[in-house]
Image (cartoon, rainbow, N blue to C red):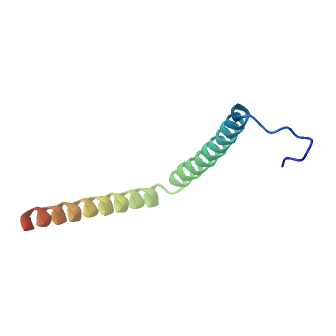
Amino acid sequence: MMDETTPPATATEQEASLLDQARDALSDAGDAIRDAVDGVVDAAKEHPAAAAAIAAGAAAAVAGAAYGISKLREKDTADS
């Protein structure tokens, strides 16, 4: 917060401050992602069958969505 004794920040100082804030945010996000990945890896090691089932289900869902999209696109091109 700026009071009467604080000189206004220059554009360069503001850019540097924003850059520092962005770096801090990215660092925090990177830490959170690393923690999440570590948790997933640990869970997969503890329960490999469940992890395999989840992966198979996710793959089936992606394949089903891709198939559905391809059918919708075929229908769109046939109607045109």
Q: Position of residue 19 (x, y in %)?
A: 66, 36
Residue 27 vs 72, above or below: the answer is: above
Q: Residue furthest top?
A: 12
Residue 26 vs 10, above or below: the answer is: below
Front in this rendered view, residue 26 or 33: 26
Front in this rendered view, residue 43 or 21: 21
Q: Position of residue 75 (x, y in %)?
A: 12, 67
Q: Position of residue 6 (x, y in %)?
A: 88, 40
Left or right: residue 3 compared with residue 28: right
Residue 21 falls in image quadrant: top right
Left or right: residue 22 compared with residue 70: right
Give the quadrant of the C terminus: bottom left
Q: At 7% across and 65% down in the image, what residue appears?
A: 78
Q: At 62% across and 42% down in the image, what residue appears?
A: 26
Left or right: residue 64 compared with residue 21: left
Residue 79 falls in image quadrant: bottom left
Numbered marks: total: 0
Q: Residue furthest front?
A: 4
Q: Position of residue 33 (x, y in %)?
A: 58, 47
